[in-house]
Amino acid sequence: MSDHDTIHDSVKTIMQNLPDGVRLLAAAKTRTPDEVKAAVDAGIQIIGYNYVQEAEQMYQIIGNRVQWHMIGHLQRNKAKKAVRLFDMIETIDSVRLAKTVDRRCAEIGKVMPVLIEINSGREENKAGVLPEQVDMVIEQIRGLSNIRIQGLMTMGPLTGDPEDARPYFQVTTEIFNRLKQAEIPQVKMRYLSMGMSNSYLVAIEEGANLVRIGTRLFGERQR
Ligand SMILES: *Cc1c(COP(=O)(O)O)cnc(C)c1O
């Protein structure tokens, strides 16, 4: 089988087995245009990138027949480009970044759906808002006119065993449910983005409705 067929089959198989209401994002870092095209041909509707420039290059080729999500840490000096390109920024991790995204969106008359990234593993060198700081961050940014808070995203510590990720998904789901029930003005808790290739089934069990998968769709990364 060609790479194209392999990717096509992987996308189909994973999509067919997702429960209703769970959306699949293809994490496409380092993949070639042919690989990404194969995924889109097979039905991928959301592509995620960690870097603005890499996303821009692929956008030239794939265009807007899919949605584009920023899933990596966004540097504020890249926000201007990012808001033109992306349909959602999943990685808002500070009030400062939210304000920059808001301002850059205002300049082009766009309202950006965003997720708050939670540092559910409380890892020192990891991006994301600590669980106890989420309410404060939301309070400070929910009034911004050009972003819309639509949910939460988390990575969790990377380990070999998917079960190790479960507590971190649980922490994030608890916050998600609590915020949803609180019905905070301007905040719509719709998306809970958790789980990667090795952990997405656990993430779905714990309530994820957006999973970000790379390796299981495209194969091991070479670069
Ligand atoms: C690469 C990446 C993924 C997917 O990782 P795989 O293990 O290849 O499925 C998910 N989320 C983020 C933020 C990533 O950078």
Image (spheres, rainbow, N blue to C red):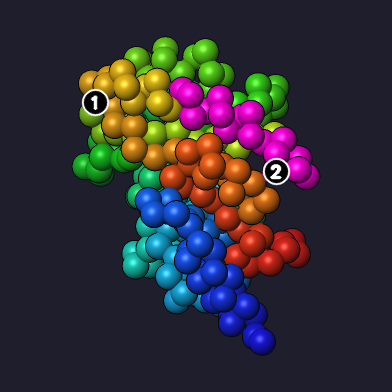
Q: Determine whether, in the image, residue 98 is placed left or right of residue 14.
A: left
- Distance from mark 2 CB to nearest ligand 1 atom below 8 Å: no
Q: Secondary structure at mark 1?
A: loop
Q: Is residue 207 magenta?
A: no
Which residue occupies 50% across, 71% down? 12
Q: Nearer the viewer, residue 76 or 164?
A: 164
Numbered tag placed on residue 95 in the rendering: none
Disc 1 designates what residue? 186
**Which circle, 2 or 1, is nearer the viewer?**
2
Question: Can you give x and y, in whole percent of width and height, for residue 182 in the image?
Answer: 31, 18
- Per the model, the C-alpha gap separating discs 2 and 1 is 34 Å
- Secondary element under disc 2, as helix, strand or loop, is helix
Q: Which mark is residue 162?
A: 2
Picture layout, residue 32 above or below residue 22:
below
Give amino acid for label 2.
Pro
Report whether 3 appears left or right of 16.
right
Q: Residue at x 69, y 67 (%)?
A: 219
Q: Quadrant of the N terminus?
A: bottom right
Amino acid identity at mark 1: Gln
| Residue 54 shows up from this direction | no
Q: Which mark sits nearer the N-terminus, 2 or 1?
A: 2
- Range of the magenta residues? 159-175
Percent coordinates x, y for residue 2 in the rendering: 65, 85
Tell how many labels: 2
* The image quarter in which residue 187 lies: top left
Question: Does 18 appear above or below 80?
Answer: below
